[in-house]
């Protein structure tokens, strides 16, 4: 007997057919390859920043500002993702995003000037920004009954791409002849591979597209529903939702901690007497912790009615890690690196909550854009402020105190964002 078919609220006309198995597999491959490409543009540059500065004659102030360019681009360009997805389809926008990443990574090492390098970097970051926002949307649309496991897979691939680019860029550069240009450009090949799975999904234009619909059981919906991959328009006023604001601030504070860790943790260890090579390995350990935990945490989160306990557990790990850096940075370096790596897994938790705090695909799109764009704006001053405090105080006491201070509100807003409610209900209740 066939299961009863129910329309989604936005469905019009005949129900679209279920997608073919090959289309679902392509989406999974596309999600994984896209996630692998969402950070190498940043971490590969960090590994060769000194060589890039020397090669382009880049000033120290401009190089310092590079640490704030990624979150700025994520905030500015990410907010455009829902509108683009409504017009062209989420798959087409992600495909274009991967093309932008490929082009930017391929061009920027050979521009020969600082403005050209920054412009090409911005192109790549623009592609990353729209893909950042639309990944939770695609997961919600294609896998509504597996949000936790698919978000975990995506987050794990993102963490793997982040740590791999940091770890192997220098060896790859040496293997390719020692030129920093080739060491940066090689990552365009991985981005180019991520374009391919999305090409068959570019034609997803309307409710009748077989590729653009999903035949899956939605959690709590009872009968099987068709969910279309294109983001439909909505009248949701996201700024009227307290949960949306809590999630945006939580996203911003966890991003602040992550960028401070990536930018400064190795220097903290080096100033404490840890050899430079070991300090780099410690940073890699922190980043690698996200690979297994990014798969586990979202799966656990979707099984809980309230994600607050996970937020608190990650926050306690962060507080313990920062306290260790303050009291005995060298003596317990490996422990602090592991603890901070666990704490940084607030990122996949935030992505999971984006998928859980909205009922519809359109709601997820708006919430994802709002939380990430607002959050990345919040994160911009953090790494710069740590550098200023370090320079003016002559030590790491004040910067670490700042990190500890920011962890407290991160835990508080994370608990609020983890409550079992949806932004659609809150926005409707706030409408006069």
Image (cartoon, rainbow, N blue to C red):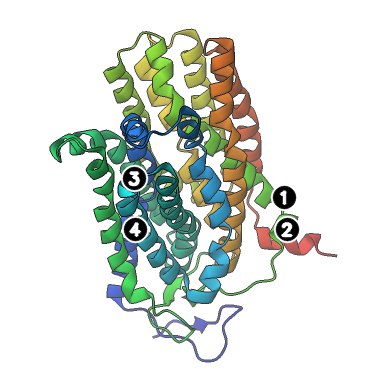
- Sequence-first disc among 2 and 3: 3
- Sequence-first disc among 2 and 4: 4
* Residue placed under numbered mark 1 in the picture: 242
Observer-side mark, 2 or 4, equals: 4
Tell me the SS state at disc 1.
Answer: helix
Q: Nearer the viewer, residue 197 or 419?
A: 197
Residue 103 - label = 4
* Residue placed under numbered mark 3 in the picture: 112
| Residue 337 falls left or right of residue 353 | left
Rendered-image quadrant of the N terminus? bottom left
| Residue 376 falls left or right of residue 235 | left
Res. 221 in view: no
Q: Position of residue 84 (x, y in %)?
A: 53, 69
Question: Which quadrant would residue 58 be assigned to in this image?
Answer: top left
Q: Residue at x 43, y 17 (%)?
A: 268
Tell me the SS state at disc 2.
Answer: helix
Residue 53 - label = none
Observer-side mark, 1 or 3, equals: 3
- Sequence-first disc among 1 and 2: 1
Tell me the SS state at disc 3.
Answer: loop
User: Dot 2: few (<14), some (14–19), or many (≥20) neighbours within 10 Å?
Assistant: some
């Amino acid at each position: 007997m066939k299961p009863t078919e129910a329309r989604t609220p936005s469905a019009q006309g005949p129900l679209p057919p279920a997608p073919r198995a090959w289309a679902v597999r392509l989406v999974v491959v596309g999600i994984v390859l896209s996630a692998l490409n969402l950070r190498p543009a940043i971490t590969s540059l960090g590994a060769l920043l000194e060589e890039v500065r020397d090669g382009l004659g880049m000033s120290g102030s401009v190089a310092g500002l590079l640490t704030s360019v990624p979150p700025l681009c994520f905030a500015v360009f990410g907010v455009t993702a829902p509108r683009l997805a409504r017009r062209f389809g989420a798959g087409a926008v992600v495909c274009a995003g991967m093309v932008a990443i490929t082009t930017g990574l391929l061009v920027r090492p050979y521009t020969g000037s600082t403005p050209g390098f920054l412009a090409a970097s911005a192109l790549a970051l623009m592609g990353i920004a729209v893909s950042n926002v639309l990944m939770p949307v695609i997961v919600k649309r294609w896998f509504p009954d597996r949000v936790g496991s698919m978000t975990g897979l995506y987050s794990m691939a993102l963490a793997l791409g982040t740590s791999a680019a940091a770890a192997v860029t220098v060896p790859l550069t040496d293997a390719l002849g020692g030129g920093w240009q080739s060491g940066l450009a090689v990552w365009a090949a991985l981005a180019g591979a991520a374009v391919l799975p999305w090409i068959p999904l570019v034609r997803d234009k309307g409710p009748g597209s077989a590729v653009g619909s999903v035949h899956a059981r939605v959690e709590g919906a009872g009968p099987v529903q068709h969910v279309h991959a294109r983001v439909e328009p909505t009248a949701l006023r996201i700024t009227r939702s307290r949960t949306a604001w809590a999630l945006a601030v939580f996203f911003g504070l966890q991003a602040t901690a992550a960028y401070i860790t990536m930018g400064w943790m190795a220097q903290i260890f080096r100033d404490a007497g840890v050899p430079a090579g070991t300090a780099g390995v410690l940073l890699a350990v922190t980043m690698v912790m996200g690979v297994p935990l990014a798969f586990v945490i979202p799966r656990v989160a979707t099984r809980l009615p309230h994600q607050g306990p996970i937020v608190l557990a990650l926050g306690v790990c962060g507080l313990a890690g920062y306290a260790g850096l303050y009291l005995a940075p060298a003596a317990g370096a490996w422990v602090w690196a592991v603890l901070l790596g666990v704490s940084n897994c607030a990122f996949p938790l935030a992505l999971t909550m984006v998928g859980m705090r909205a009922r519809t695909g359109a709601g997820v799109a708006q919430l994802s854009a709002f939380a990430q764009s607002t959050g990345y704006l919040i994160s911009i001053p953090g790494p710069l402020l740590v550098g200023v405090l370090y320079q003016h105080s002559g030590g790491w006491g004040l910067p670490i105190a700042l990190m500890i201070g920011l962890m407290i509100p991160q835990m508080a807003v994370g608990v609020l964002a983890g409550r079992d409610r949806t932004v659609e209900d809150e926005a409707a209740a706030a409408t006069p």
